[in-house]
Image (cartoon, grey):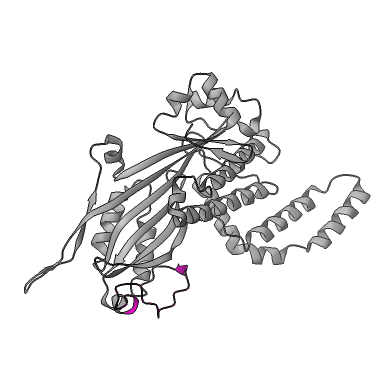
Amino acid sequence: MTPESDAATRYFDAISAALKGLDIYMRDERSTLYRHDLVAKVVAEYIAQLEKSFSSWRNRLAFMATFKISRAESGFPVFQNVLELENDRRQAKQRLASLPEPDTLRAEMADFILRHKEFPASLQQSMAERLYLEDIKDGETFGSFSLAQTVKVSVNPKTMRPYYLVHWASYDGSANLPLIYMATVEDSSEGMIRQLVGANGRLNEKVNIPLPVEGLLNPELAHRFDDFTEKSSAYTLSPATIAGNLDKDFAELHPKQLRRVVLGPFYSAGITEHNSTVSEVLAKVRKPENAWLLTWTVQEVYSKSEKPGRKGLWSSEPASEEFFINTDDLEAARQGVSAFEKHALIPHEAYQVLYAAGEAQKIFKDYEVHILSNGQVISDV
């Protein structure tokens, strides 16, 4: 792609509209995730980071024409773009120091135009690079991996253990998909129980926890938890596998629920090639800015029971979770989840074209469809 190409413009316009529509849906009190308002808030924060990333990639094209998307698979940028953006953020201040100040660049551009009667392309690129670096040096983009944050702390009155709602995210390098993780984890560490559980079986009122907290709230396990999540966030790992490994690797942590939001695939007319039927129909949409389709999947695995630990004279065994996998649903069993939801967001004009072509029912089978129209999202169509 080059900054002059219609394809680049159409792609960035389409993905921007899709992410704005997804943000509207997530913040709508009628949306599925809004029933868990904290979950919706977490997802919305990562969507904002993705929007920032795409804005930055678009600005980067003004001086460096290197941007590739996974046209035949996810429809999202390839992993190398994510790494380049992270590298640019780390070097932003250093690179800005080597570039002339904006006023100096403007003066040099004006002088060049007056003396040479032509456009100062190299100076324009320097200005574009400066604006790009200024924009990303403090901005929060969607990285290859985001360390966990604890956003909720409470107490399970049945087990008398504190539990945490923790979230983290990764950009899968093989599937080229943004992944968002949220886990509800009980902590049986004696020190954390003494500190957090009050005599009444509720969260100790004397403990002031300024949420969110960077990392797992338990400081003794925080670094190990970061290492685990970074190594265990691949798309190829099922939620059941990740939750099971977490349960095995941490004797004091008891994962009761793990939720993963897989953003994508994304379809854009004339750009992506991963579904010929969708591509052919979207190509008939009159307005290019409405010729797209964004899908996402919400996967969930939860513990149906906990096997008590055993302490003996010669051996011991920690408590372990028994995760429910819905084997009555072949797709749920294949994904390794207790339950899942498949969603699709599409502009009203594109949905009308799909419907008129008789393809809507086939394409959206098993999907919850959400239609973006006049800045609002209409669901249950």
Q: Main secondary structure of the magenta part?
A: loop
Name the residue: 57% across, 23% down: 353
x, y (%) of residue 186? 30, 65
x, y (%) of residue 59? 67, 49
Which one is nearer the viewer's eye here, 329 or 196?
Answer: 196
Can you name the residue that lies furthest to the left here? 313
Q: Quadrant of residue 252?
A: bottom left
Q: Quadrant of residue 169?
A: bottom left
Which one is nearer the viewer's eye here, 31 or 236?
Answer: 31
Q: Quadrant of the N terminus?
A: top right
Residue 145 shows in the view: yes
Name the residue: 65% across, 66% down: 93
Q: Is residue 262 above or below residue 10?
A: below
Can you name the residue that lies furthest to the right here? 114
Which one is nearer the viewer's eye here, 120 or 232?
Answer: 232
Q: Is residue 204 magenta?
A: yes
Can you name the residue that lies furthest to the bottom here? 206
Which region of the structure is painted magenta?
Answer: 195-214
